[in-house]
């Protein structure tokens, strides 16, 4: 009696190839994260510089705050507050940057707002800090180190794949 296989013939995929495809995908994701986080940090710095240069002082009334969860999700690492303010005769509502303290609804704060982008609002204290903050670049730099390490390991293992 003969052997009968129904459907298409099976395809053999080596485990080495699967490992390299998964490793390549991981390296690609790391590279993408480095780019996205770096662009975000640069945007954050340029926004702070713009507020420092052309920002208009206004008074904002806190409308509410929401806790930011830690990495585990069990504890709160700070608060993000929103507030209403009047700029050039128009009412606006925006997230109040530069503060992570819990504020009660109705509290008032002195902030600086961008007249061309009323969603860019930060506390006077945070805008008064000179220079740019390097801390925004910690995450992308750490991921870049991980990316370079993964790339070096992959490059070192490449001759073994060809065997």
Image (cartoon, rainbow, N blue to C red):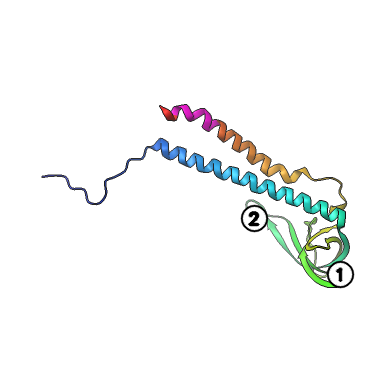
- The reply, left or right, for residue 140 in relation to residue 83 is left
Please name which of the two marks, 2 or 1, marks the residue nearer to the observer: 1
- Which span of residues is magenta-colored? 153-160
Residue 158 among those drawn in magenta: yes
Which mark is on residue 47?
Answer: none
Specify the quadrant that holds the N terminus: top left
**Residue 65, position as x, y percentages in the image:** 74, 64
Is residue 24 toward the left or the right of residue 102 in the image? left
Q: Check disc 2 and report its element: helix, strand or loop.
A: loop
The C terminus lies in quadrant: top left
Q: Quadrant of residue 161?
A: top left
In the image, residue 116 above or below residue 25: below
Which residue is located at x 78 percent, y 51 percent?
A: 46
Q: Label 1: which residue?
A: 88
Q: Main secondary structure of the magenta part?
A: helix
**Tag 1: Cα neighbours inside 10 Å, few (<14), some, or many (≥20)?**
few
Q: Measured along the vertical axis of the image, is residue 23 above or below residue 60? A: above
Residue at (32%, 40%) from the top-left corner? Answer: 12
x, y percentage for residue 92?
A: 79, 69
In this figure, which residue is indicated by the disc labeled 2?
Answer: 74
Mark 1 secondary-structure assignment: loop
């Amino acid at each position: 009696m003969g052997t009968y296989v129904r459907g298409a013939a099976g395809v053999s995929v080596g485990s080495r190839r699967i490992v390299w495809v998964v490793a390549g995908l991981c390296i690609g994701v790391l590279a993408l994260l480095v780019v996205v986080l770096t662009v975000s940090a640069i945007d954050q710095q340029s926004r702070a510089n713009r507020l420092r240069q052309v920002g208009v002082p206004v008074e904002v009334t806190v409308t509410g705050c929401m806790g930011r969860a830690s990495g585990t999700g069990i504890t709160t690492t700070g608060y993000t507050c929103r507030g209403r303010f009047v700029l050039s005769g128009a009412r606006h509502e925006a997230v109040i940057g530069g503060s992570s303290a819990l504020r009660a609804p109705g509290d008032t704060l002195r902030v600086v707002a961008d007249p061309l982008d009323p969603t860019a609002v930060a506390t006077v204290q945070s805008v008064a800090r000179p220079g740019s903050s390097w801390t925004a670049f910690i995450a992308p730099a750490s991921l870049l180190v991980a990316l370079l390490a993964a790339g070096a390991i992959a490059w070192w293992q490449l001759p073994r794949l060809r065997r």
